Amino acid sequence: MKKILTLAMALTLTVSLAACGNKDKDNNSSGSESSSLSGSILAVGSTALQQLADTTAQKFMDKNSGVSIQVQGGGSGTGLTQVADGQAQIGNSDVFAEEKLDADKAATLVDHQVAVVAMAAVSNKDVGIDGLTKQQLVDIFTGKVTNWKEVGGKDEKIQIINRPSSSGTRATFEKFALGTKTEDLAGSIQEDSSGTVKKLVSETPGAIGYLAMSYLDDSITTLKYDGVEATVDNVANGSYPVWAYEHMYTKGEPDAATKAFLDYIASDEVQNGDVVELGYIPTSKMQVKRDAAGNVTK
């Protein structure tokens, strides 16, 4: 009898330990992708890329509790400078590093292209037009045209909402929409954040600005460019020219945590999910390519 009791107790203990082991295994599989992965990541720069960076960073941290990721804006130039100087692990940028940095600094960086984004001119909903030509945009942003009636809209003064010179969104808009750099005009408003630009354009009578596609909604009018709408299909096939790659630069090869985060953003889960849902375009959908000089090839 004693032998039978001892055997029963041993079996009970074995079953209990097995159950605990399975429970721990379940907890690990539903919590961290890698329980050993740890580190801190600072990603700084483009506000056009900030929505994607913020969203994916939170999801990545949920899966990897040992990793802390902080995402900050400040513009592409700021992101590139900070990552080149070793102050951040990732420099978020709408432009190639060689467009903003000295050749020596740019050469130290590794480019990770995570998405494509279109930039579009946007206006307050009261201006009375739905599109502008390239020349009309140039005339507005260089101060030759100052009233909407001069381009077919209402008799209303044009209020420019601009981005600072460090902004990759501004660099992209000037390069591919205007074809020229512009000066900051007297009376124009300059804002560091794409979110603030959107808010000001929606609330300011006669306002015009420009935003990444990920910020476009019904609170503002998205203006056609030479009659072409800023849509995913038009960007992908090359008929809408105002677009840029979204880069996440690292100084040299990334550390383990940063590499895992970049791999996560490049995964099908993110590329077919968050990238599309947030208004970006997966690079795999592009039918054209563009180099740092702006040359487009099929």
Image (tube, grey):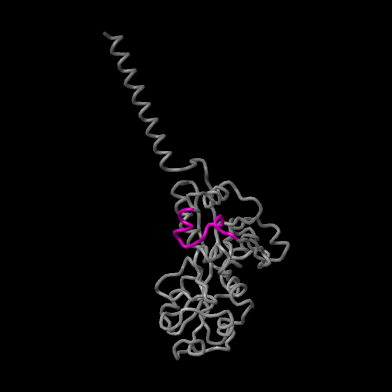
The extreme bottom residue here reads 155
Find out whether residue 66 is within the magenta segment: no
Q: Residue 79, position in %: x, y?
A: 59, 63
Q: Which of 262 and 124 is in front in this view?
A: 124
Q: In which quarter of the image is residue 140?
A: bottom right
Assign the C terminus to one quadrant of the image.
Answer: bottom right
Q: Where 189 falls versus 295 (above or below)?
A: below
Find out whether residue 284 is within the magenta segment: yes
Q: Nearer the viewer, residue 72 or 128?
A: 128
Relative side of 182 to 148, left or right: right
Q: Residue 265, position in %: x, y?
A: 52, 52
Q: Residue 1, position in %: x, y?
A: 26, 8
Q: Where 166 falls versus 14 (above or below)?
A: below
Q: Nearer the viewer, residue 22 or 226?
A: 226
Q: Quadrant of residue 88?
A: bottom right
Residue numbers of the magenta segment:
272-287
The extreme right residue here reads 104
Q: Residue 154, position in %: x, y?
A: 44, 88
Q: Where 12 falls versus 237 (above or below)?
A: above
Q: Which residue is drawn at 57% across and 61% down?
A: 246
Relative side of 24 to 265, left or right: left
Q: Which residue is drawn at 60% across and 77% down?
A: 178
Q: Which residue is drawn at 66% across and 57% down?
A: 109
